Amino acid sequence: MSKKKGELEGFKHRMYENNKYDVIHIEVVGSITPEGYMAINKRYSTWETGKPEKVIIDLSETDMSSMVPWDRPIRKKVKDSTEQFSPNAKVAVIGADTSAISQLVMKITLNILGAIKTSKFFDNVEEALAWLEGEIK
């Protein structure tokens, strides 16, 4: 099976740059595991142009049932082995389950593991890009 554009080694997750908008697009495919998160974070922290400040996380291909809380030792291991997002990063999340619980779990995950202060949920890429570009609040 061939790799898709931006596919991370050992995972189906994809990460690539939208040069037109200077945005990093992360597609989380399948389960969300500590190992998968660490692979995404490693790729983000070594991005060629530095840590991007505008990020879209696409969960439309994510198994949302895999979003179970990680126990304390796993959270510590993940946090200790990953770099923080840029302090000015804005993260737009698309494709998330619309339930308040799923969005709360995702927001907590972003805040604890990535120290992301500015994030918002959107229905599609166009809305996410408009928000990241400051066209909508």
Image (tube, rainbow, N blue to C red):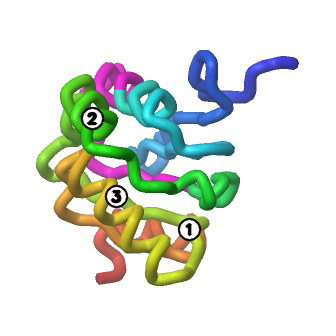
Q: Residue at image x 59%, y 16%? A: 9
- Mark before the other along the chain sequence, 2 or 1: 2
Cα separation, mark 1 vs mark 3, equals 13 Å
Q: Mark 3 points at which residue?
A: 91
Q: Mark 1 points at which residue?
A: 96
Q: What element carries label 3?
A: strand
Tell me the quarter of the picture where residue 85 sits.
Answer: top left
Is residue 90 in sight in this rendering? yes
Dot 2 surroundings within 10 Å: few (below 14), some, or many (20 or more)?
A: few
Q: Is residue 111 or residue 130 the one in the foreground?
A: 111
Numbered disc in front, either 3 or 2: 2
Q: Distance between the residues labelled 2 and 1?
A: 26 Å
Mark 1 vs 3, N-terminal side: 3
Q: What stretch is highlighted in magenta?
A: 42-58
Q: Where's residue 108, x and y in %? A: 29, 62
Give the residue type that dot 3 points to.
Answer: Val
Residue 52 is left or right of residue 37, and the answer is left
Q: Quadrant of the C terminus?
A: bottom left
The residue where tag 2 is placed is 73
Say which amino acid is labelled 2: Pro
Q: Are marks 3 and 2 in contact (CB under 8 Å)?
A: no
Residue 30 vertical position relative to residue 125 in the rendered view, above or below: above
